[in-house]
């Protein structure tokens, strides 16, 4: 999870979300990471990732964060930090907790009152994981596949 500094916006226009997702895909590949679930909210990001490398998540987030901040500062003629410190992460080892994290991520826009159904939010992996739409960024997580697509639809 990474939050905007002082909980301020870190995405201002549709292009910002698109660039972030493109760079996320690029740096995930370079760092040996797979993205299982994501949501880009106005002022924060949630990612569910796995990595073959112990330092993969750190490498991914550092490169992505730096590039995105440079883009935002240049695009919006601003300077300084965009993110509230370093990204936060936790290790997910049990399938039950993994499914809970997955649901939490993809239902974030619903809980925030931004949409009534997670499939209505364009900046999330829900359409890939919950509706079977193609998304080159998403690598379905085996535990989620085993639980079935309905596990992500439960509110």
Image: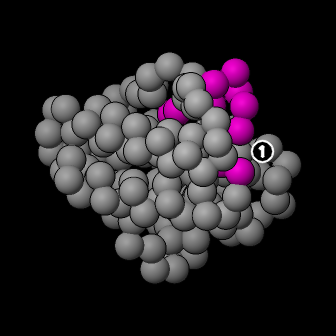
Q: Secondary structure at mark 1?
A: helix
Relative side of 72 to 24, left or right: right
Residue 154 found in image quarter: bottom right
Q: Nearer the viewer, residue 106 or 23?
A: 23
State the residue at coordinates (43%, 63%): 22
Q: Nearer the viewer, residue 11 or 137?
A: 11
Question: In the image, residue 60 lies at what x, y percent?
Answer: 30, 42
State the residue at coordinates (24%, 57%): 29
State the residue at coordinates (19%, 32%): 55
Res. 150 visible in picture = no
Res. 87 visible in picture = yes
31 in the magenta segment: no
Question: In the image, residue 86 lies at what x, y percent?
Answer: 44, 22
With respect to residue 15, does 107 lie above or below?
Answer: above
State the residue at coordinates (50%, 67%): 129
Q: Which residue reaches farthest left?
A: 53
Question: In the image, residue 13 lies at what x, y percent?
Answer: 70, 58
User: What span is in magenta?
Assistant: 1-12
Residue designated by label 1: 111
Badge 1 crowding class, 10 Å Cα cut-off, few under 14, some 14 to 19, many 20 or more, is some
Relative side of 28 to 44, left or right: left
Question: In the image, residue 133 lies at what x, y percent?
Answer: 51, 80
11 in the magenta segment: yes
């Amino acid at each position: 999870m990474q939050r905007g500094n002082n909980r301020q916006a870190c995405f201002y226009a549709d292009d910002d979300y698109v660039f972030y997702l493109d760079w996320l895909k690029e740096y995930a590949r370079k760092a040996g990471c797979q993205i299982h679930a994501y949501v880009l909210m106005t002022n924060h990001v949630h990612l569910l990732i796995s990595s073959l490398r112990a330092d993969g998540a750190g490498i991914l987030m550092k490169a992505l964060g730096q590039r995105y901040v440079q883009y935002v500062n240049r695009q919006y003629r601003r300077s300084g930090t965009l993110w509230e410190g370093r990204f936060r992460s936790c290790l997910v080892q049990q399938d039950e907790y993994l499914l809970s994290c997955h649901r939490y991520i993809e239902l974030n826009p619903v809980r925030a009152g931004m949409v009534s159904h997670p499939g209505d939010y364009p900046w999330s992996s829900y359409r890939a994981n919950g509706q079977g739409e193609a998304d080159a960024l998403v690598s379905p997580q085996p535990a989620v596949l085993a639980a079935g697509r309905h596990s992500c639809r439960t509110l």
